[in-house]
Image (tube, coloured by chain):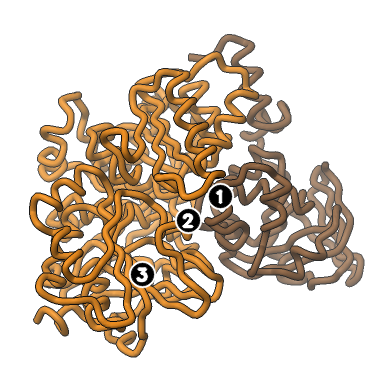
Chain colours: A brown, B orange
Amino acid sequence: MKAFKGKAWKVGDNVDTDQIVAGRYLSLTDPEELGSHCFEGAYPELAEGFAEGDILFAGENFGCGSSREHAVVALKALGVSCIVASSFARIFFRNCINLGLLPVECPGAVASIDEGDEVSLDAEAGKIEDLTKGLLFEFDPMQPFLDDILAAGDLTSYVQKRLAEGHAG
Amino acid sequence: MGLTITEKILARAAGREMVEAGDIVRVKVDVVMGHDVTLPLSILEFERMGAPTVFDREKVIAVSDHFAPASNIAAADRIKMVRDFAHQHELLHYFEPGCGQSGVCHALLPEEGLILPGSVILGADSHTTTYGALGAFATGMGSTDIAAAMALGETWLRVPESLRLYYRGELGRWTSGKDLILHTLDRLGVAGAIYKALEFCGPMIEKLDVSGRFTMCNMAVEAGAKNGIVAPDDQTAKYLRGKTSRPYEALRSDPDARYAATFEFECQGLEPQVAFPFSPDNVRPVQDGVDVKLDAAFIGSCTNGRIEDLRVAAGILRGRSVARGVRLIVIPATQKTYVQALREGLLEVFVEAGGAVSTPTCGPCFGGHMGLLAAGERAVSTTNRNFVGRMGHPESEVYLASPAVAAASAVVGRLAHPQEVAG
């Protein structure tokens, strides 16, 4: 989960969660069904062609709008396990952490990498490489305050641990 | 060094003397709310977490409002899941249309006296920021965060930097809180306040009624903000009277509190504002849109479905009809608002004008049900978002405006300044 290699896909600034999964599908909870509507109407080629290991690059404020966690569920079902953006909307960022989808802020990489480039990302080293262009970008690894949650695996596992320790109050 | 109201609330909830922007704090929460779109995912996670029950059955609140009354069988299943969860854990507050008090969650909770100044409110919905209008810290989160808060009664937060938004001037006859917040989004942009607290203040905000403050805090999230907040004052106290007798402390920012930036807005003479497709910050005065022909007008939602909004809309629609080719949908945001509008004769005005009036639901605002748009159609809407496909087909268009502009536009058949219709 910490290292990825594949093709770069690009989307623009302010991609909202309605584009990731539209409101009319929000009565669904099954990940596969949600994934089948991911980016529907907005980025059909991406929805069709995205493969495991590929990396999504986005501009400013990715995931803005609704708090719907369905957006992260749908992206994961599409095969997205890492998103590199110039910046993230805050609820979406939390949802990524909580569901184990890696959000990376690296505006430099977003500016230089083109769609279709061969890219790799090492989360622990904080490095993104554009193998097509021979460029290297660095980013800050995850902030330590999230360590407790990340160490537990995800938020649900963290809460399980807290409850087991009797810290429910 | 002084603290902002947001910092004071979070310090208190964290059990600390003080906090600073950037601190990560673990805070106790006073209300955890979710609805029929987000709670089903929370419930699945809550069950995986293995908590025997919720941390406090008075503080965990469930509202079926988005797809309710159930729009299809999948929605009926989700609503049942929420209803069953509420019953199983004996939640004191579960709301659904047809079961007593109900309504769009962000209009409903304040009306039911469930939001107090100085409290910490988490909602599995981005427009949870609305409650900041009463001087609470209120923010939206995803379903799993909400599940954790339902189990533990706490959450972690990064204390946000505050932006001080200071408003001067007098509102004109046809301008409202909606126009102020659209004007604000025009200046800040949709990414202008990511992670930040928006503190609305100044003489204009002091004069603005609580309903207008709800509208402004509702759309704080449209600038990317973590919360919007207005310091509680006499208007807040008056609003709360009769709704709750629980005590609260009216916190205010210190004069020497630290802000990331201050924005001043001179709003004297501000014209009604409209956000054009496809972003809430694509704002222009309504006069720039008078060539935009419309197929639909929607008046309602957590942004503008309160009684004050319906009064303004009815004032324009009284004795007039919707333009040929335009369909008008009006949805009072809560059951109490519905009854009040009924008593005041407002619903009669809407129906006689040719409009359709529905029981409270979020339906049209998020493209869920109750009047979606077809390809190529255009709507003026008093809601909060006009993203691609927000209210229906990806090739439909939504223009965000105040109830006054929406009502006038419904009469004329294109975007219209209310004075065109009502003088």
Is B143 located above or below residue A122 in the figure? Answer: above
Q: Which mark is residue A26?
A: 1
Cα distance in 3D space between marks 2 and 1: 8 Å
Whether residue B109 is visible? yes
Q: Nearer the viewer, mark 2 or mark 3?
A: 2
Give the amino acid type for the residue marked by disc 2 in the picture: Gly
User: Crowdedness of circle 3 by 10 Å Cα count: few (<14), some, many (20+)?
Assistant: many
The percent position of residue B147, horizontal first and vertical second, equals: 54, 30
Q: Position of residue B25 (x, y in %)?
A: 49, 31
Q: Which corner quadrant of the image does residue B114 belong to?
A: top left
As helix, strand or loop, the secondary structure at mark 2 comes to: loop
Asked if the residue at tag 1 contacts the one at tag 2, i.e. Cβ–Cβ closer than 8 Å, the answer is: yes
The residue depicted at 12 percent of the width and 56 percent of the height is B207
User: Which numbered dot is residue B368?
Assistant: 2
Q: Amino acid at mark 1?
A: Leu
Q: Between marks 1 and 3, how big is the CA–CA gap?
A: 22 Å
Residue A47, quarter of picture: bottom right
| Kind of element beneath mark 1 | loop
- The chain containing the residue under callout 2 comes to B
Please state the chain letter of the residue tagged with numbered disc 1 in the rendered image: A
Q: For the residue carrying disc 1, how many other residues have a C-alpha within 10 Å: few (<14), some (14-19), or many (20+)?
A: many
- Residue positioned 26% across, 43% down in the render: B253
The reply to whether dot 1 and dot 3 touch (C-beta < 8 Å) is no
User: What numbered label is drawn on residue B400?
Assistant: 3
On the rendered image, what quadrant is the N terminus of chain A found in? top right
Label 2 crowd (10 A; few <14 / some 14-19 / many >=20): many
Q: Vertically, is A168 above or below B276?
A: above
In the foreground, B181 or B49: B49
Q: Amino acid at mark 3?
A: Leu
Q: As drawn, is A86 to the left or to the right of B416?
A: right
Q: Nearer the N terminus, badge 2 or badge 3?
A: 2
